[in-house]
Amino acid sequence: MDYPPSVQRLIFALRQLPSVGPRSAERLALHILKSDSSLAESLAISVSEARRNVRPCSRCGFYAEGPICEICSDPNRDTKTICIVEQPTDVLSFEKSGAFKGLYYVLGGSLSPLDDIGPEELNIPKLLARISDEGVQEVIIALNTDVKGETTMLYLARELHQLNIKVSRLATGISIGSSLEYADSLTLSHAIGDRKEV
Amino acid sequence: MDYPPSVQRLIFALRQLPSVGPRSAERLALHILKSDSSLAESLAISVSEARRNVRPCSRCGFYAEGPICEICSDPNRDTKTICIVEQPTDVLSFEKSGAFKGLYYVLGGSLSPLDDIGPEELNIPKLLARISDEGVQEVIIALNTDVKGETTMLYLARELHQLNIKVSRLATGISIGSSLEYADSLTLSHAIGDRKEV
């Protein structure tokens, strides 16, 4: 004996989600069965609607419900500054900080020759064309600080310098509010190297 | 700036699930957006189907897709023995062990006067009627061994003895494969009291 087939199908579907193992999938499924039917309904509807309505913005690659995302279509943004990030979620992190008022460009990953991911796969030629077409004045490269991200940063910086624009990267150093005890030595050495006079 | 409305609705719906906080809901939602659309589709369909098709079995309270569950409609089960459990999931635990071939009865909870949960709320009168109608010979009470479970067990035992049938409870003792080091003292005292000659 096992669960009825439709419960088994639900458990199987839930297991496809990240960090949901067999036990959590079972727990989630049983919760859905026990709770009010409006929960199941809103979950089912929102899953299909989100998947159907949301597409990458054709200009920057962030999530959009129309052809262009809300950021790209906002007339109050500074169109002369572009921040290059790896993932759409990185855009949200900057937006939450409120520290950036320009536009974004989502690469969708980083250069990785071993995985056959070159500049073409990350739409870098399209990005370079956009930058020279639109008279962009500064590009901020905000990629992850792992090996792949650094390689991609160096490649982008070289290409962008040929367009004669200002290229910058995020400052590296210790996190605000963190304890020095937990900072790794590479971060500490960057933080000492880039120390600021007070 | 925030996610497009349909992504926000999806995140909100996912947050209603147990042990899914704001961050995990976001991660799950973004995974659904990124992955193949068949995942979203099968998830949405299985959620609504499971919620629509699955009902408590009218005889025992376990999950059923028809009026009667698969266990109650199986002609090979021993209908003279009934095992009383708290939750539908407990039925599955016994079924996985393969040690019980009788029928079940799911109370749906335990007696709790402070929460206004009395015998009526747990359908105990219906259970007692079924037991005397169907000529059941033995009832195994398999409730949780917490205070509420024990109270419910004592109440059920008293009621069942009036029907002149055999009433038993699960053996208590140390778990198979566990180390004595981790057994609590109450369990150990039960295990010594119920020791078996070898």
Image: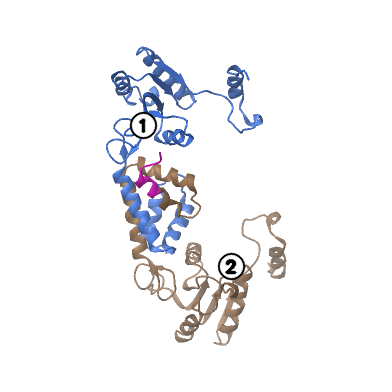
Chain colours: A blue, B brown
Q: CA distance from mark 2 to mark 1?
A: 61 Å
Q: Residue at x 61, y 27 (%)?
A: A184
Which amino acid does the dot numbered 2 rest on?
A: Asn
Q: Which residue is mark 1?
A: A76
Q: Is residue B77 above or below residue A63?
A: below
Residue tagged by mark 2? Answer: B144
In the displayed structure image, the side of residue B126 where residue B44 appears, left or right? left
Q: Chain of mark 1?
A: A
Three-letter residue code for mark 1 = Asn
Q: Nearer the viewer, residue A192 or B145?
A: A192
Q: Which mark is residue A177?
A: none
Tell me the chain of label 2.
B
Q: Looking at the image, which residue sits at the far left?
A: A67
Left/right placement of residue B51 relative to residue B111 reads: left
Q: Position of residue B113 (x, y in %)?
A: 59, 75
Q: Main secondary structure of the magenta part?
A: helix
Which label lies toward us, 2 or 1?
Answer: 1
- The stretch of residues the image draws in magenta is B1-10
Q: Residue at x 69, y 66 (%)?
A: B191
